[in-house]
Amino acid sequence: MRPTILNPLFADVTTLPGVGPKIAKTISRLFNRSGDDTASSGVHIADLLWHFPFTVIDRSLRPRVIDAPENTVVTIALTVSEHRPPPRHNQRVPYKVRCFDDSGELTLVFFRAHKDYLQARLPIGETRLVSGKVETFDGQPQMTHPDYILTQEEFDAFPLVEPVYPSTAGLAPKTLRNTVSAAVALCPDLPEWQDENWLARQGWPGFLACLGSVHSPARLEDLEPTAQSHCRLAYDELLANQLALGIMRNTLKKASGRSLAGTGELRKAIIESLPFNLTGSQTGALQEILGDMASPERMLRLLQGDVGSGKTIVAVIAMAAAVEENCQATLMAPTEILARQHLATIEPICQAVGIKTALLTGREKGASRKLLLQQLAAGDIDILIGTHALFQSDVAFHDLAFVVIDEQHRFGVHQRLALQAKASAGTDVLVMTATPIPRTLTLTLYGDMESSKLIEKPAGRKPIDTRVLPMDRISDVEARLAKVLIEGVRCYWVCPLVTESELSELSDAENRFAALCARFPGRVGLAHGRLKAREKDDVMARFQSGEIDILVATTVIEVGVDVPEATIMVIEHAERFGLAQLHQMRGRVGRGTGQSSCLLLYQHPLGDIAKARLEILRETEDGFRIAEEDLRLRGAGELLGTRQSGTPGFRVADLAAHGDLLAAARDDANLILNRDSKLAGERGTALRILLYLFERNEAIRLLAAG
């Protein structure tokens, strides 16, 4: 149950003064929400607390009329001398109010004005404080539609620095500002959940004071992510995040596990059969994984490996340890292409040592699927590789003990738990990702897991020659391609769009495919996300077999396609892709022993961030450095190229600015849960309010479930 003290904040925004269904619906667009009916907008009052202003309007400049700068917001004390309404039958003429101070005259101009309102608001002979921008018309200063007209008493209570909020079409800035102000005013004085000594060291005020400071800034600097109030609120959110992950980690570890020490025989046979030696990184990661498996507690470990670092063989050896205990293992991939590729890699290795593997995707149907499921339930299949099809209710294992999930960010946490639930006893879980993740995001995306990294590439891999060229050099690229295709080289050619668009001048895959087909007939294939899975698989198979030499594609080839003979990657409009995406696509080449090239084609003019991105890619192949730079340049929300289901939805914290606070929040969360795992003490009770406030309700549910 949510604490009653928070109930006012989780009421619908329609309960705020002046917010009817129409305004509420417009506000809901700010948060990509929509309510169930006209009585609900889907937006809580609490959502408005985290909707921070992005700039301010400073009305503190108080010049005389003669000194007022043009096109600058000023506040001037003016005495009203005359009203000049427009002719009765010509409303296109503006309503003018002549005013003065001791330095000169200024005219206030109003179009489609209400005479009675203006005469009441600006009585002749009275002095008013008027705020807006001054401009010159016919050599005379004037102010069109002043932002504010105030009496001295009203001005005394008026904030001279006015916050400006991110808005949306149809929502007046003043309406949004008043609505957020009303939401902040409703926030109760909540019990302090932070450690007093920590607050004192940081010099941070209380929660309510910080909230007020962000929404009523005294100067523009108060809105910086590094401002004291913003840091305090960011730390609150980070602590809520780390507490929730810590509770999840503790809950999973408490669930019954089993020791999978194994005999080592199958692992030894696999390692001896490999035509290469494991890298130091692979050996170290295996020791960590096998150590977890041998423990009676459940394993939950993340294996991060840059493109081509050899994650799959590490997973195979770990799965073999489970098979040594007469248990089953499964590997789940996000796409059918990737699942089939894993089978092609894993099956020969396993066959050589007597491990039975099988594949289950949506394509397996009828009698063959029925037989496969019977073998799985009987324990005749040791390792099952598959896609989302593994979640289906009729998929039953004989004794599942080890789960490998590839590209976790493409699955939700609930899917991971659903797969674990298929085990008769506690399963060990290994999550793999080929997307290098910055340290700060590792803590937020995978904070409920231990982490291992592969930072070396297998021996024999050569650096990829990365070059940056303008788009007008495409004819040169095609000419060079014509020469190297004779030598049996294969090439990826990536375009940002599938089809031509009237809204964009970006290159599209279909037109590029047609152009390359004209030059290289019968040697070009096309792959993109709109193709059916079977069509996509067929063209990939033709490319892998060498039937075609050039594969024109969209980012569908970003993850998991393995063609060692492909040594050229051409990416059109590279400036439109994120660093992580570019690095992933470049990683499709350089997988064999031959020299590989990556050509990044860009369109003039090139912005500063795009230029920096391409320069970093040219300088390094270190995926972890690239990920850190991507976070710095683009922010956490876009780290994975597009917003993925696994990306943390922070409302206040900016990981590029608050990364140092994240490590402190993790340490604090661990300390809290070690001392008070049920959050039952005085601070624990306050921390429960924090978790609800930042909508980490799932953590409370896990606490309640024990």
Image (cartoon, grey):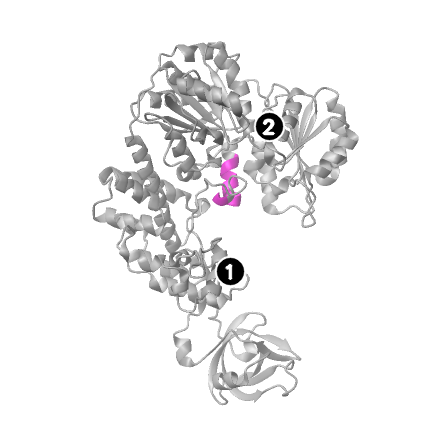
Closer-to-camera residue (67/94): 94
Main secondary structure type of the part rendered in magenta: helix
| Residue type highlighted by circle 2 | Arg
Q: Magenta stretch?
A: 626-637
**Label 2 crowd bin: few (<14), some (14–19), many (20+), radius 10 Å:** many
**Label 1 crowd bin: few (<14), some (14–19), many (20+), radius 10 Å:** some
In this picture, residue 688 sits left or right of residue 501: left
Which residue is rendered at x = 43% and y = 43% of the image?
Answer: 648
| Count of numbered labels shown in the rendering | 2
What's the mark number on residue 541? none
What's the mark number on residue 167? 1
Which residue is rendered at x = 73% and y = 32% of the image?
Answer: 477
Which residue is rendered at x = 31% and y = 39% of the image?
Answer: 247
Query: CB of mark 2 within 8 Å of CB of mark 1?
Result: no
Q: Where 613 falls versus 325 (above or below)?
A: below
Q: Where 164 falls versus 144 (above or below)?
A: above
* Residue 458 visible in the displayed image: no
- Residue that numbered label 2 is attached to: 588
Q: Quadrant of residue 246?
A: top left
Mark 2 and mark 1: span between their CA atoms?
A: 41 Å
Closer-to-camera residue (250/616): 250
Q: Quadrant of residue 580?
A: top right
Judging from the image, what secondary structure is the residue with disc 1 in?
loop
